[in-house]
Image (cartoon, rainbow, N blue to C red):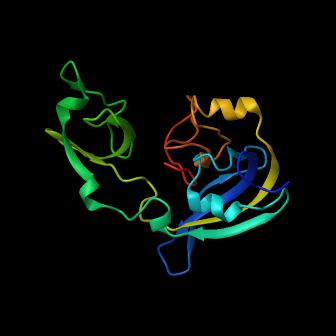
Amino acid sequence: MKITVNKSVTAEYELFVDGENEGELELMEKATAEQPLSFIYGVGMMLPKFEENLFGLESGENFDFTIKNEDAYGTYDDESVIDLDRGIFEIDGKLDTDMIFEGNIVPLMDNDGNKLNAQVVSVSDSHVRVDLNHPLAGENLHFKGKVLDVKDASDEELASLNYSGCSCGSGSCGCGDDACGDDGCSTGSCGCGN
């Protein structure tokens, strides 16, 4: 069976980004046969270019392709690094140090009620600097892997898309904005659509 719209796809892969030196690649994440990436093809769960490169492949076929940053998570935007008032992150006048520390990903909401994730860059006495760029913004994504299984998506799988839009293996590529975690989603997403 070939990968087409509404097929349930299971794959193992390694995701690499460009390394420090020319031609060098750095492993970012991997999904194994034991904990694979699982998603429904053609329903917006994955990056369009990721799906485009898998279209028509069958179980057992290998893939090896690159998605340029402009077709993945865009270029890195320096203006998406902002300072927020430290008080936003305080509870009873104390900073929530379990959540707010350099390098941690924190959930935020904009003025329109849209949820987004931000990485804490630094914490000062008055502000918390956060980076709103996707963790893979500015990166070219290099995928190497193998299609493990292709089958018709069940009615239950298709119906569940209206609920969560998230289908995870060990890799973080199986979810919309977020990747697999304890609640079904966390950050990281490589092949994801949003």
Q: Is 90 placed left or right of 28 in the picture?
A: left
Q: Quadrant of the N terminus?
A: bottom right
Q: Residue furthest bottom?
A: 22
Residue at figure coordinates x 48%, y 48% from the top left: 194
Residue at figure coordinates x 57%, y 47% from the top left: 44
Provide residue 7's location: percent of width, then percent of height.
75, 47
Closer to the camera, 150 or 10? 150
Provide residue 117's location: percent of width, then percent of height.
39, 41
Q: Residue furthest left?
A: 126
Q: Is 152 placed left or right of 19 in the picture?
A: right
Residue at figure coordinates x 81%, y 49% from the top left: 150
Provide residue 28's location: percent of width, then percent of height.
56, 58
Q: Is 15 placed left or right of 118 in the picture?
A: right
Closer to the camera, 161 or 20? 161
| Vertical position of residue 32 compared to residue 68: above or below | above
Q: How many numbered tags mark residues here?
A: 0
Provide residue 113's location: percent of width, then percent of height.
32, 32
Q: Is 130 placed left or right of 103 in the picture?
A: left
Residue at figure coordinates x 49%, y 78% from the top left: 21
Closer to the camera, 162 or 143? 162
